[in-house]
Image: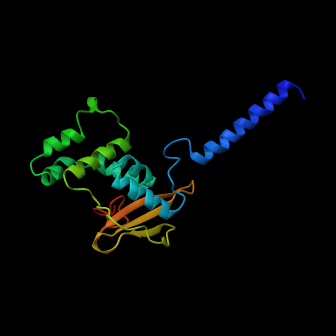
């Protein structure tokens, strides 16, 4: 065998091995999210929510939940809600969360979602409070192919509805606290369309 063929075989082998390693670790941060089971998806969602990593929270939402949130955001005037919740600090909170668009660092929807969640947190108006303690319960199958998982106990418990993406990953469709509507993504608030 010639030196050229040996080197070619080695290079091909290295490419194949690095491709397998890359597939195991994921190319992008989204690809590396552990969403292979409903319980893993809930655990990562809760971890990101508690860490105020709302970009990752958005990525774990199902495409339908992301679209629902984006549609709500695009058609909702947030000023009255923030005014009511912020006790007169509306302009301060809105300016901090949403400076003029020419001053934005990003226009990506996950970044905008993050800014809205930070503004809601500042106003004391997060749509869901995650229980301080607890773990995900067992996934309960639903007739529509989705699953429901409870997290936490008692009055602070939240309920997750998850759906399986075409890739096989589990994604959060809705997170409900109290009497929310599990068919209303992503927070169970408002009427179902």
| Residue positioned most to the left | 88
In the image: residue 144, left or right of residue 22: left
The residue shown at (66%, 39%) is 18
**Above or below — where is 50 with respect to 3?**
below
User: Residue 109's quadrant in the figure?
Assistant: top left
Please state the horizontal and vertical placement of residue 2, each as a whole percent of the image. 88, 26
For the residue pair 18 and 177, the one nearer the viewer reads as 18
Q: Quarter of the image containing the C terminus? A: bottom left
The residue shown at (90%, 29%) is 1
The residue shown at (31%, 75%) is 154
**Above or below — where is 186 with respect to 3?**
below
In the image: residue 168, left or right of residue 84: right
How are the residues colored? rainbow
**Above or below — where is 40 with respect to 83?**
below
Please state the horizontal and vertical placement of residue 4, each as a whole percent of the image. 83, 24
Please state the horizontal and vertical placement of residue 6, each as a whole percent of the image. 83, 30
For the residue pair 106 and 20, the one nearer the viewer reads as 20
User: Residue 135's quadrant in the figure?
Assistant: bottom left
| Residue positioned most to the bottom | 154
The residue shown at (80%, 33%) is 9
Circle count: 0
């Amino acid at each position: 065998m010639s030196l050229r063929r040996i080197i070619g075989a080695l290079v091909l082998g290295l490419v194949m091995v690095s491709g397998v390693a890359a597939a195991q670790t994921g190319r992008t941060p989204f690809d590396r999210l552990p969403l292979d089971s409903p319980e893993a998806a809930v655990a990562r969602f809760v971890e990101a929510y508690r860490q105020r990593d709302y970009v990752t929270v958005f990525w774990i939402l199902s495409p339908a939940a992301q679209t629902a949130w984006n549609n709500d955001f695009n058609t909702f005037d947030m000023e009255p809600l923030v005014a009511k919740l912020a006790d007169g600090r509306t302009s301060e909170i809105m300016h901090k969360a949403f400076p003029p668009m020419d001053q934005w660092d990003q226009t990506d929807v996950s970044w905008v979602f993050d800014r809205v969640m930070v503004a809601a947190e500042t106003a004391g108006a997060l749509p869901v409070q995650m229980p301080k303690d607890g773990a995900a319960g067992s996934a309960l199958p639903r007739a529509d192919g989705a699953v429901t998982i409870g997290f936490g106990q008692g009055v602070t418990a939240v309920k997750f509805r998850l759906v399986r993406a075409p890739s096989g990953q589990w994604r959060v469709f809705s997170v409900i606290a109290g009497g929310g509507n599990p068919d209303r993504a992503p927070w169970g608030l408002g009427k179902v369309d």
